[in-house]
Image (cartoon, helix red, strand yellow):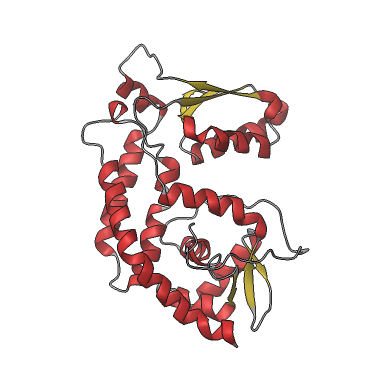
């Protein structure tokens, strides 16, 4: 998630034997859960805080989200197990961001804060693969991770996503070491035997996506009054949607599609709350960083 532009860039962290390798997006963390909220705090604020935070401060920030201290500590331990955080003592016991998480967080910045909606003139990326049964675990992971970036299923071995996600799709293929079995094509608007909205409804689960948008819009009516808590819960409720929703062009969507309202409300509220939330984080962490 995006770093505050006023903050100094974090100095490169020294290699650590705790580093566990590439850190993946955690789309399965249920919005509003302790794991998801803590991950949102880490993604939003550790980079502008020079990549480190004291244990006491992250527990305090969690407390502002009504997460009990013991529950927060358990959640932090799980983030360590997933490789997102590494234990590091500075002026106090604390945690630094795993440098291997940088690519994932930067990708999250682009998705969350620069959500793209396609036009009819935009290109598509087709992902064709034929993976042998001996590598079925790779086939499973490929399909799962293509779903994470909002790809649709034309057929079991042919998937489709917006053209601007082609590099991201290829990163997934390369990370799974599946390049020998996968071919990517850049394509124009598909020609289908049925109207495009009907084809899109078969390639993507638009009913499920609609439900996600409506749930997000409902969550906005329950945001806390305090800016930090409201902002973190806003980002946490939103962060999955820009992954699973590919931003299809209007010509492929029903007339009453709720995505436009979700995008507009997120942009308005995030702009309103971000600065006040950042001030709160700086106030909470200032003592530990100066001592």
Q: Is residue 289 left or right of residue 220?
A: right
In the rendered image, residue 23, in percent from the top left (x then y), is placed at 63, 53
Residues 243 and 168: in front is: 168
Name the residue: 78% across, 63% down: 17
User: In the picture, which quadrant includes the C terminus?
Assistant: bottom right
In the rendered image, residue 57, in percent from the top left (x then y), is placed at 52, 79
For residue 208, which quarter of the picture? Answer: top left
Name the residue: 65% across, 61% down: 98
| Up-down relation of residue 230 to residue 167 (above or below) | below
The residue sitting at the left extreme is 256
The residue sitting at the top extreme is 193
For residue 177, which quarter of the picture? Answer: top right
| Up-down relation of residue 164 to residue 96 (above or below) | above
Q: In this view, does 122 lie to the left or right of 78?
A: left
Residues 193 and 289: in front is: 289
Q: Is residue 60 left or right of residue 97?
A: left
For residue 30, which quarter of the picture? Answer: bottom left
| Up-down relation of residue 68 to residue 152 (above or below) | below
The residue sitting at the bottom extreme is 291
Look at the image and tell me whether residue 135 can be seen.
yes
In the rendered image, residue 226, in percent from the top left (x then y), is placed at 32, 74
Look at the image and tell me whether residue 27 can be seen.
no
Name the residue: 35% across, 40% down: 209
- Count numbered badges in the picture: 0
In the rendered image, residue 282, in percent from the top left (x then y), is placed at 47, 77
């Amino acid at each position: 998630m995006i770093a505050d532009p006023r903050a100094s860039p974090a100095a490169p962290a020294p290699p650590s034997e705790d580093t566990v390798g590439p850190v993946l997006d955690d789309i399965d963390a249920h919005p509003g859960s302790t794991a998801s909220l803590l991950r949102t705090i880490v993604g939003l604020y550790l980079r502008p805080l020079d990549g480190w935070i004291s244990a006491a401060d992250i527990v305090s920030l969690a407390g502002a989200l009504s997460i009990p201290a013991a529950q927060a500590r358990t959640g932090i331990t799980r983030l360590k197990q997933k490789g997102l955080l590494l234990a590091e003592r500075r002026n106090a016991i604390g945690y630094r961001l795993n440098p291997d998480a940088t690519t994932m967080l930067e990708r999250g910045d682009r998705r969350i804060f620069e959500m793209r909606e396609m036009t009819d003139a935009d290109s598509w990326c087709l992902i064709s693969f034929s993976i042998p049964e001996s590598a079925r675990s790779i086939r499973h992971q490929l399909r799962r991770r293509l779903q994470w970036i909002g790809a649709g299923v034309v057929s079991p071995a042919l998937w489709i996503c917006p053209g601007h996600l082609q590099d991201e799709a290829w990163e997934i293929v390369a990370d799974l070491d599946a390049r020998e079995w996968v071919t990517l094509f850049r394509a124009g608007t598909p020609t289908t035997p049925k109207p495009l909205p009907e084809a899109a409804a078969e390639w993507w689960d638009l009913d499920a996506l609609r439900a996600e948008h409506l749930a997000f819009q409902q969550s906005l009516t329950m945001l806390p009054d305090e800016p930090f808590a409201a902002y973190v819960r806003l980002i946490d409720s939103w962060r999955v949607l820009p992954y699973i929703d590919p931003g299809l062009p209007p010509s492929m969507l029903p007339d009453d599609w709720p995505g436009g309202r979700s995008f507009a409300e997120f942009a308005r509220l995030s702009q309103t709350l971000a600065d006040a939330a950042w001030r709160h984080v700086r106030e909470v962490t200032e003592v530990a960083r100066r001592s």
